[in-house]
Image: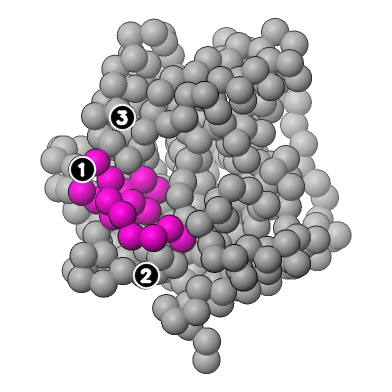
Amino acid sequence: MRSFKKDPSCWLTCNKTVGKMNVLRGLFTKSWSSDTRFDGKTAIVTGANTGIGKETAKDLARRGARVILGCRDLLKAEQAAGDISRDVENADVVVRKLDLADTKSICDFAELIYNTEKSLHLLINNAGVAICPYSTTADGFETQFGVNHLGHFFLTFLLMDLLKHSAPSRVINVSSSAHHMGKIHFEDLNSEKSYHPVKAYVQSKLANILFTRELATRAEDSGVTVYSLHPGVVQSELFRNLSKPVQIAVKVFSPFTKTTIQGAQTTIYCAVEPKLDKESGGYYSNCAPAQCSREALDDEMAQKLWELSCQMLGITWD
């Protein structure tokens, strides 16, 4: 049996199979749409300078929201904000510096939000890195775990008071169906003993869902609801770190992948669908509830990951 530990293209093949299933499912399911407005509400979208993050931000701007693009690359973010403003009349879009690989940058971003914004109704944790060579964040965390999980965990922690103050509000964590191959390596969360780019990626995506479940439990009755999702297999810059042969395979399978607009729909669904008000902690795909892995449903694992994440970040979050 092929293993992604030895062959990264195995992961790609699995995700492309999911992509084909998405296309087939789309032939037999009704597409989702909503005219929900967000006038007077504020949203943060991380990694909104490109891909599904940019499309999510554009959709929310069309609904009347004030949208904050939290991005590491300010030049690309300003270009994205300009594109959105040209496409959306009277768009209220601003750019703020946010490097999820640096807890100081996350602190600076959160402080600026508290100083400039009276409310926060949507926090969309969209940014991510995938299948990259081994590296560490400014704080010494393995990059994929550090950015995809710990960075968003810390950002949500810092902004939670504002989210509660603005309730009803939502936190949306963009995960992946790749979490089905994931395992939380509690004995080596930082991949210091061994590292494989795919293993680290799927661990981080599983962590997104476990974080969602535990936060939903802890935020119960606060007015803050939480959701995780699989956007689909999307043609985006997320594949930029894959090898040349695998990138060629991405192009070959492109008819079975989603556009960035299509890929953003489940994020938007989790952000605006009224019926989700009472479904905090759920996992979604194709704008509908989806089945996640057995590990992703393990509440003891979710609690343990929460506690270890707090230890790694040096915070207390009860």
Q: Is residue 85 left or right of residue 103?
A: right
Residue depicted at x 74% and y 47% = 259
Q: Is residue 114 left or right of residue 45?
A: left
Q: Which residue is mark 1?
A: 139
Q: Is residue 51 left or right of residue 109?
A: right
The x and y percentages for residue 24 are 80, 65
Q: Which disc number belongs to residue 196?
A: 2
Look at discs 3 and 2 and give the one toward the viewer: 2
> For numbered disc 3, what is the local secondary structure?
helix
The x and y percentages for residue 163 are 39, 24
Location of residue 1 with respect to 32 vertically, above or below = below
Q: Earlier in the sequence, mark 3 or mark 2?
A: 3
Q: Is residue 172 magenta?
A: no
**Which residues are the magenta region?**
131-149
Residue depicted at x 43% and y 14% = 119
Q: Is residue 85 left or right of residue 306?
A: right
Q: Which disc number belongs to residue 204?
A: none
Residue depicted at x 50% and y 35% = 47
Look at discs 1 and 3 and give the one toward the viewer: 1
Residue type beneath disc 2: His
Residue type beneath disc 1: Asp
- C-alpha distance separating marks 2 and 1: 20 Å
- C-alpha distance separating marks 3 and 2: 27 Å
> Splitting the image into 4 quarters, where does residue 108 fall?
top left
The x and y percentages for residue 60 are 64, 24
Q: Earlier in the sequence, mark 1 or mark 3?
A: 3
> For numbered disc 2, what is the local secondary structure?
loop
Given residues 264 and 25, the one toward you in this image is 264
Residue type beneath disc 3: Ile
Q: Which residue is mark 3?
A: 106
